[in-house]
Image (cartoon, grey):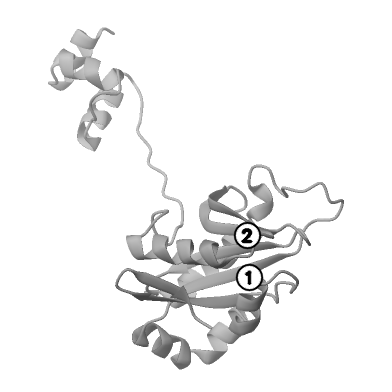
Amino acid sequence: MSLRDVGRAVGIDPSHLSRVEAGARDLSAASLIAIAAVLGHDVSTRLYPSSGPRVRDHIQVRMLETVMAAAHPRWHARLEVPVYEPVYGVIDIVLQDRLTDDLVSGEGHSALTAVDAQLRWAAQKTDALPSARGWPWTDAPAAPRTCRLLVLRSTAAMRDLVRQLPETFAAAYPASSADARAALVGGDRRWPGDAILWVDIRGAATALRR
């Protein structure tokens, strides 16, 4: 069918359809469904489980910047790492230790709104890390040791939340925050395991809490 025929059938100006084809304009969902019906197709939308868009807010970006700025040169950072199987999602940051090849899969949150779901989703994405392109980013014969990192904004509300759920957070992130910070900023300490790092944000200043 020509653009003119399609446009006439769905009530859309053919010149607009031409711009849509060229990528210069968008279609509403209703128009897309109408065009699909005229062309003999069905439209399907698939929703993947996720805790939110890739970059949730500017605070999260500043938190990850703080982690990377504090990291010793032994750490190589990869941002926004897509994983595909068994779940589809994007890991906020993956840190790779050049000394040990350890991988640290990190999620940053300026606020936690659904703790169980967010912790579970972080664990699922970490488990899917072998499906990332380029995995394991090393020539070592053995699969790298993989740990999880939760980067939280240090606010009174966030600290109170973690204190109210001590067993939940201890089970998900049992390693010491102090040990994780020491491994991140130092040149010789191995990453201690699944851990939380806290970031202070006060105006334009940010800092990794000790």
Q: What element carries label 2?
A: strand
Image position, residue 127 (x, y; %): 65, 60
Which residue is more in the foreground, 5 or 180? 180
Image position, residue 103 (x, y; %): 69, 61
On the picture, is 190 further left or further right than 10? Answer: right
Which residue is more in the foreground, 91 or 206? 206
Rendered residue at 87%/51% (across/down): 141
Disc number placed over residue 184 in the picture, else none: 1
The three-letter amino acid code for the residue at tag 2 is Leu
Location of residue 100 with respect to 35 vertically, above or below: below
Rendered residue at 71%/69% (across/down): 187
Q: In which quarter of the image is residue 194?
A: bottom right
Q: Residue furthest right?
A: 141
The three-letter amino acid code for the residue at tag 1 is Leu
Among numbered discs 1 and 2, the one appearing first in the sequence: 2
Q: In this orientation, does residue 175 appear?
A: no
Rendered residue at 84%/51% (across/down): 140
- The answer to whether the residues at label 1 and label 2 have Cβ atoms under 8 Å apart is yes
Image position, residue 88 (x, y; %): 54, 50
Provide the residue designation for mark 2: 95
